[in-house]
Image: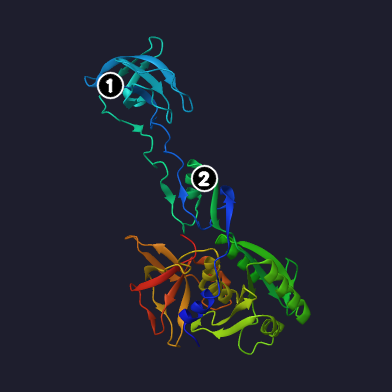
Amino acid sequence: MIPLEDARTHVLDRCVALATETIAIDDALGLVLVEPVRSTGPIPPFDNTAMDGFALRAADVETAPVALDVVGTIAAGARPDVEVGEGQAVRIMTGAPVPPGADAIVMVELTDFDEAAATVRVAESVPVGNHIRPAGDDLSPDAIVFEAGTELSPAHLGVCTSVGAYEVVARRRPRVGVISTGDELVDGPGPLEIGQIRDSNRHTLLALVSSMGATGVDLGVVPDDEEAIRAAMLDAAAECDAVVTSGGVSMGDFDYVKKVLDEIADMRWMQVAIKPAKPLAFGTIGTTPVFGLPGNPVSSMVSFELFAKPGIRALMGHESPILAPLVGRAAVELGRRPDGKTHFARVEAQPGEDGVFEARFSGGQGSHQLSAMANGNALAIVPDGDGISAGEPVELILRDWP
């Protein structure tokens, strides 16, 4: 068996960041910037009000309560067409530009507006600058908004459009082909014959690929036929930036996938010191990474988390392809036996009263028991030994936020 970190290093050394592209902002979610985003002007671009209320001169309400003449109204999106003079106020809506002469906003809750008389009674004094958002308060002109290496979230996209960056230079989105092989696999809801199983792994892996911001390419099920497998693998490597398969990687497996990949790819067949997901095949067809994951459903998902996900993140240009685990604590004993492997227990992790995540088994721990993965949201890293006692620290790989 080889250590987990050695297997990861082997994978990451062969997953090279993809080329850069100029990408429309609405297509950039989850991508990694190659060039920084800069503001083209101040944000906000003009002094504006943070409240519905009245724009006025702070000096005029020092002796509040006081009545002022209302000389206009400014809605959001309107250009000010009036200047605020001594003893005057302008009715103003949130986001509207502050009119000339005004240096403060009093919120509507502190006023009594007499529309017929065009006067407003202000109940309290306010300081200069009250409820005014100055131009450039968020971003100054030509400021670096986001550095290269930033992964673009929905909030990032909103900021980009606010500064006029409707295109960004980023690593292109990888296309990851997912393929299943085997005469025993059936895709569909119909009844199963003896010896048949439904192809759950392909659907799971496609969803995992999509959830991390890559594009999953469904390459379907290929029968146990050497030429069909060869053609499918070569087509996948030509069409996609990475290929993921499941099954046929264990010691002693008799599988056409092994024979074909040994002929057309530079493969390494590994036994990694982990449980589940000990068997791993990884290599390249040309420059296209190929991840051969175990066939057991849980093992396939764990192997994806530990190897395929970091590899795909490296293709996407992430500076830290391996996400650091979160330190929580065991809510119950996470028992195991010494076997020379690191165990990845399927757990449910929820924040305790002190905010620390507490982990407990989410179901059966067999490599075929996919429901425990579905019922849990994390993998607990249990080092070789007798396990982790209740209350002790445990490292957690969060798959979903609770």
Q: Nearer the viewer, mark 1 or mark 2?
A: 2
Q: Position of residue 271 (x, y in %)?
A: 54, 85
Residue type at mark 1: give it.
Answer: Ala
- State the mark number for residue 94: none
SS of the residue at dot 2?
Answer: loop
Left or right: 402 as drawn, with respect to 230: left
For the residue pair 147 and 290, the one nearer the viewer reads as 147
For the residue pair 7 and 136, the one nearer the viewer reads as 136
The number of callouts visible is 2
Find residue 179 and report its image quarter.
bottom right
- Furthest residue in direction front, as rendered: 142
Left or right: 228 as drawn, with respect to 258: right
- On the image, numbered disc 1 is attached to which residue? 123
- On the image, numbered disc 2 is attached to which residue? 165
Q: Earlier in the sequence, mark 1 or mark 2?
A: 1
Relative to residue 122, is residue 295 depicted above or below?
below
Residue 294 in sight from this viewpoint? no
Q: Position of residue 116 (x, y in %)?
A: 41, 10
Q: Position of residue 9 (x, y in %)?
A: 49, 78
- Between the residue at mark 1 and the residue at mark 2, the CA separation in whole angstroms equals 43 Å
Residue 15 in sight from this viewpoint? yes
Residue type at mark 2: give it.
Answer: Ala
Relative to residue 308, is residue 101 depicted above or below?
above
Q: Residues within 10 Å of mark 1 (few under 14, many from 20)?
A: some
Find residue 182 and report its image quarter.
bottom right
Whether pointer 1 and pointer 2 mark residues with C-beta atoms closer than 8 Å, the reply is no
- Which residue is drawn at the image coordinates 29% and 14% (left, top)? 87
Find residue 342 and report its image quarter.
bottom left
